[in-house]
Amino acid sequence: MIIVVGSLKGSPGATTLSLALADRWPLDGGDPVVVEADPAGGDVGARFTLAPGRGLVSLAAAGRRGEQSPRALDEHFQELPGGLQVLCAPAGAEQARQVVGELGSGGWSLLRAAAQAQDRPLIVDCGRLDPLSPAGPLLGSADVLLLIMRARNDELSHLAARMPVVQGWGLPAWYVVVVAEPGRSQGHRVREISRVLGPRVLGPVPYDTDAAGVLAGRRRTRAGIGRTKLGRTVAGIAGALATTAPAKAAPPARQALPPLPPDPVWPDAGPPMWTGA
Ligand SMILES: Nc1ncnc2c1ncn2[C@@H]1O[C@H](COP(=O)(O)OP(=O)(O)OP(=O)(O)O)[C@@H](O)[C@H]1O
Ligand SMILES: [Mg+2]
């Protein structure tokens, strides 16, 4: 199963969500790998002081050498405290753009073949899904896209403007993951967004600096994020995604998406309607 996580603008937490999903993935759902395919440059390597050059850079080099065997892929992965396996992007945008762009010429197929052979989900953090993003082609093999954004007018306006584009990607499934703003109940915003997008909306993912700090290498804790608000919410999302995973041998069906309202707009929310978030 391939889950692409991306944003439209800002830094709403795509990397954090990708790592949280992998961390909270159900035990019987395969051992996930997080692929940091962000053309703006990776953060995970610096956040966890990983070895530079091991990850997308070494995978791209293997693709250039024409390596065919997916078995040697483990040598490109690195392990985070707690055991998560990641394939990280280099920090600079120029090099990151290049290696993400190069994935299509061999590395991506190697990775997919290895993941499929070992029944491991790939959680691919593509960063911002700009129109010219070199990560765009990875969407073509995604089973699910999670578009993450904060429940703010500016971020939501980007979704409203790009809705036809997102629908045009023809993905088997896509959802909007709404992240709560610090210190505010976001229930009313999420309800409002849900009114337009229906069951496509997941969240709100709580604003949880402690758990986000663990996932960004700023905090160390033996307990991990399992019992945190963020961990519990993301466990629910991971569980739902894992149970809707397409059968391994299923053809890559590209079903038509159900029609959505043509011109979604989110007027100012006004006072909260409920405070259950
Ligand atoms: N749910 C959350 N609660 C609190 N802080 C969060 C949450 N999600 C992310 N953060 C924090 O926000 C910052 C940005 O998060 P992250 O790096 O995941 O964003 P991003 O969308 O990947 O950004 P970019 O596109 O720049 O890579 C980080 O400091 C992270 O710890
Ligand atoms: Mg990121």
Image: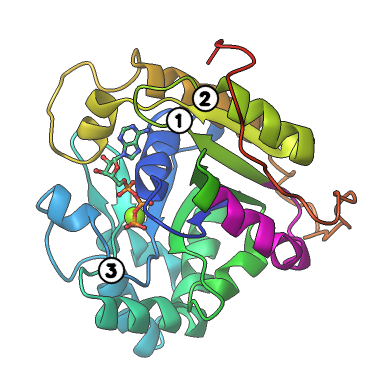
> Residue at the bottom extreme?
65
Disc 3 target residue: 41
Query: Is residue 53 placed above or below 229 in the rendered structure?
Result: below
User: Residue at (40%, 76%) from the top-left corner?
Assistant: 100
User: Residue at (58%, 49%) from the top-left corner?
Assistant: 156
Could you say where residue 147 lies in the image, as x and y percent from the top left?
Answer: 57, 50
User: Residue at (39%, 17%) from the top-left corner?
Assistant: 229
- How many neighbours does mark 1 have within 10 angstroms: few (below 14), some (14-19), or many (20 or more)? many
What's the residue type where badge 1 is placed? Ala
Query: Contact (CB < 8 A) between labels 1 and 2?
Result: yes
Residue 75 on the magenta span: no
Ligand 2's quadrant:
bottom left
Disc 2 under 8 Å from ligand 1? The reply is no
Disc 1 target residue: 180
The stretch in magenta equals: 155-174
Query: Is residue 183 placed above or below 13 in the rendered structure?
Result: above
Q: What is the magenta segment's predominant secondary structure? A: helix
- Distance between the alpha carbons at the discs numbered 3 and 1: 25 Å
Compared across the picture, whether 198 is left or right of 61 comes to right
- The answer to whether one can see residue 122 in this image is yes
Q: Of the two numbered discs 3 and 1 on the same chain, state the one appearing first in sequence.
A: 3
- Distance between the alpha carbons at the discs numbered 2 and 3: 30 Å
Residue 165 on the magenta span: yes
Label 3: state its secondary structure: loop
Disc 2 target residue: 186
